[in-house]
């Protein structure tokens, strides 16, 4: 996903002269392409994520659309207040990019497990959360974000080089997108982010259900959910994130706000996984159903 | 503008902020008073390139008050140089007003909202890079408090600014030696501050932060010197201008009562 991200960002930056990439001393053998094309719109700020995020706010206030790029929790939790005060409150076009969303860096340990990041980024009123499920969605959400520069979070998986979804020309935030294999079932699975890979690897669990993705969501997209959800009899949300403050609970809150009581189950990571150091595949075996 | 006129401007700012803080029963009066003379020179002598009629003109210098708790001083100077009517200052600290008690970007002339310390200098680094990349010759000014220098994010920015030779960045440290609870020395000693900045690769200047001539001269020197970011350590007196507030920790938070207010007005009018 990260290579697709950099390649596509580089392509977009050829036309869009405002795109600026900051990296927090990560991206070896990945980000060089952008750096070589656009040395004037690239900076490695060093291992200093608080500074990186505030620098992004400063650059953005001068007209750039800034991407801050780092791993797991470093561009989010480490600099949460800079995101809140400097980017979100000033409504500046900064896209925070995290590589290794979920447990893609499973064996590297808890410091590298981004399993509470939705919870943090969901609390930012102006932020859109872009969590692509595959390579096609990486391109689609980037197209949207660069056409609509705004505070945003782009969560990339590390072990997902698949194409499950169809290309979407003009992606709409808050909208659910069906997979082409869907048969028109009333019972559906709604996945966001790279957990789509887990859904596809466990597709036998979801017989007689259609699969949807929700690639762009966030606080501002809650109101749209009622009319979409009302079309289905039951919904199972899927995320590679702790259940608490995650994607499933966002959907439940969204429907509660609008007064809809719909049967929702959530598949998410239980608390026990915070003590696991293992491969992504093994950690995701612990996915638990929350009713 | 002569230094006599700057003195009058500084006095007006002090009177304005005193009234604002007294009326709203808010804190940080001493933190405001220590930077008034710096602000009076920056804006009164037009060291900062600004146009109150076109506050968002792209060809402008940018000022960030990183010690956002001194917002009353900033609002007062902005009103006195024409960004908005002085009547607006009466809104300070009242319900639903943009003139909140920490610097707010919703007030014309305030570039960034601050209030949590350690944000202004890193933002200024981004602005300074942007100006350089766009080949604009504007300067970025930041005022930090001395206690604020304990925030680690400042030191990330101090490293960054010298590495990238951000000579369009001018940091002024309001070195009044007192923070909210005790002296800086007793809390987390910062000395030798000058040596710290020198070793980080900055140009450093030490001045009396209440001497108009020194303030003007050092700012002009900063603007003309090339190759390094600049730090001005401005030795100031917390509470400057109101005798019973000077160099007293409690006036970081305390709000003057009517008797104290009247006495302060008398001192400022004399």
Image: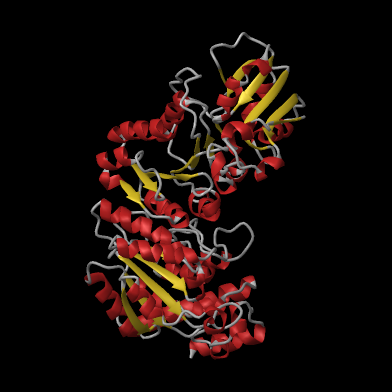
Picture coordinates of residue A211 (x, y %)? 61, 18
Q: Residue at x 71, y 41 (%)?
A: A272
Q: Is residue B43 left or right of residue A133?
A: left
The answer to which quarter of the image holds residue A207 is top right
Picture coordinates of residue A144 (x, y %)? 44, 30
Q: Is residue B126 left or right of residue A73?
A: left
Please state, as top left, top right, bottom left or bottom right, where the N terminus of chain B lies in the image: bottom left
| Front in this rendered view, residue A41 or B14 | A41
Position of B122 relative to A1 (above/below): below
The answer to which quarter of the image holds residue B224 is bottom left
Tag count: 0
Q: Is residue B261 left or right of residue B42?
A: right
Position of A69 relative to B37 (above/below): above
Picture coordinates of residue B230 (x, y %)? 31, 71
Picture coordinates of residue A174 (x, y %)? 57, 28
Colour scheme of this structure image? secondary structure
Q: Residue at x 47, y 72 (%)?
A: B149
Q: Would residue B53 be visible to someone looking at this image?
A: no
Q: Residue at x 27, y 63 (%)?
A: B165
Q: Would residue A72 be visible to someone looking at this image?
A: yes
Position of A184 relative to B17 (above/below): above
């Amino acid at each position: 996903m990260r290579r697709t991200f950099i390649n596509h960002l580089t392509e977009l930056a050829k036309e869009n002269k405002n795109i600026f990439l900051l990296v927090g001393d990560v991206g070896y053998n990945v980000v060089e392409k952008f750096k070589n094309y656009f040395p004037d719109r690239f900076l490695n700020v060093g291992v200093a994520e608080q500074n990186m995020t505030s620098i992004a706010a400063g650059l953005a206030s001068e007209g750039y659309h800034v991407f801050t790029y780092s791993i797991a929790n470093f561009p989010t939790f480490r600099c949460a207040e800079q995101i809140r005060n400097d980017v979100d409150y000033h409504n500046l076009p900064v896209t925070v990019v995290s590589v290794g969303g979920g447990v893609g860096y499973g064996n590297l340990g808890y410091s590298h497990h981004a399993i509470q990041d939705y919870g943090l980024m969901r609390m930012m009123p102006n932020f859109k959360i872009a969590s692509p499920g595959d390579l096609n969605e990486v391109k689609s959400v980037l197209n949207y974000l660069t056409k609509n520069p705004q505070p945003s979070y782009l969560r990339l998986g590390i072990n997902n080089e698949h194409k499950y979804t169809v290309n979407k020309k003009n992606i709409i935030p808050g909208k659910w997108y069906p997979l082409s294999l869907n048969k028109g079932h009333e019972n559906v699975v709604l996945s966001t982010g790279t957990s789509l890979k887990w859904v596809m690897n466990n597709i036998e669990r979801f017989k007689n259900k259609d699969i949807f993705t929700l690639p762009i969501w966030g606080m501002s997209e809650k109101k749209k959910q009622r009319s979409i959800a009302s079309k289905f009899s039951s919904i199972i949300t899927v995320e590679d994130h702790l259940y608490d403050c995650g994607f499933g609970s966002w959907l439940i809150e969204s429907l509660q706000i609008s007064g809809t009581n719909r049967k929702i189950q959530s598949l998410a990571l239980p608390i026990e996984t915070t003590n696991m150091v293992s491969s992504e595949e093994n950690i995701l075996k612990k996915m638990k159903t929350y009713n | 503008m002569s230094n006599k006129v700057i003195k009058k401007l500084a006095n007006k700012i002090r009177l304005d902020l005193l009234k604002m803080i007294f009326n709203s029963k808010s804190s940080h009066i001493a933190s405001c008073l220590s930077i008034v003379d710096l602000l009076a020179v920056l804006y009164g002598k037009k060291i900062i390139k600004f146009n109150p009629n076109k506050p968002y003109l792209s060809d402008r210098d940018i000022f960030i008050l990183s010690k956002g708790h001194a917002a009353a001083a900033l609002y007062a100077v902005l009103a006195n140089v024409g960004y908005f009517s002085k009547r607006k200052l009466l809104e300070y600290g009242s319900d639903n007003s943009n003139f909140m008690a920490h610097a707010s970007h919703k007030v014309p002339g305030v570039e960034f909202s601050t209030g949590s310390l350690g944000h202004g200098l890193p933002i200024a680094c981004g602005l300074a890079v942007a100006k350089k990349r766009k080949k604009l010759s504007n300067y970025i000014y930041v005022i930090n408090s001395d206690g604020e220098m304990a925030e680690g994010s400042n030191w990330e920015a101090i490293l960054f600014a010298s590495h990238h030779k951000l000579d369009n960045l001018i940091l002024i440290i309001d070195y009044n030696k007192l923070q909210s609870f005790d002296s800086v020395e007793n809390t987390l000693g910062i000395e030798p501050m000058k040596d710290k900045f020198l070793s980080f690769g900055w140009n450093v200047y030490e001045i009396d932060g209440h001497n108009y001539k020194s303030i003007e001269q050092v700012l002009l020197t900063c603007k003309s010197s090339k190759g390094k970011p600049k730090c001005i350590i401005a030795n100031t007196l917390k509470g400057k201008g109101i005798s019973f507030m000077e160099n007293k920790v409690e006036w970081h938070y305390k709000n003057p009562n009517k008797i104290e207010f009247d006495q302060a007005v008398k001192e400022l009018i004399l």
